[in-house]
Image (tube, helix red, strand yellow):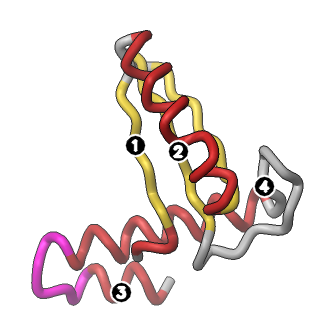
Amino acid sequence: MNNVLAALMADSEEERQKHLDREVLLYAVQRTIQCQRTGAILDVRTAVMATTVLGDKRGAWVMTGDAWDEMEEWTKAKVAEIGATLEVIDGRKL
């Protein structure tokens, strides 16, 4: 909840978005608990949530930063191949 309050009080849109992204990632980590690729326990500070959007369909995966680093290029290529959009929230950058 502190992230939501910080977002409301942010001085810039970029700062506001970082706080909201952190809150979204925190929620995803709390619900998922384990990396969907490796099974490792997730930490919001190093977790990554990758969401594919194709029309009105969305699919999201929550994983460790290391797991994301291993599959980032492949994922981007596949998303481009099917004409979808990729949204990434990387806890290491928040």
Q: Are marks 3 and 1 in contact (CB under 8 Å)?
A: no
**Circle 4: element type:** loop
Q: Are marks 1 and 2 in contact (CB under 8 Å)?
A: yes
Tell us which disc is closer to us: 4 or 3. Answer: 4
SS class, disc 2: strand
Residues shaded magenta: 8-14
Give the labeled residue for mark 3. Answer: 5
Q: Which residue is mark 2?
A: 50
Q: What's the amino acid at mark 4? A: Cys
Residue lying at 41% horizontally and 12% vertically, measured from the top left: 81
Residue mark closest to the camera, 3 vs 1: 1
Identify the disc placed on residue 26: none
Please say whether residue 13 is one of the residues in the magenta stretch: yes
Q: Amino acid at mark 1?
A: Glu
Give the image location of residue 64, x and y in percent.
Answer: 69, 61
- Residue at (62% x, 74% y) in the render: 44
Amino acid type of disc 2?
Ala
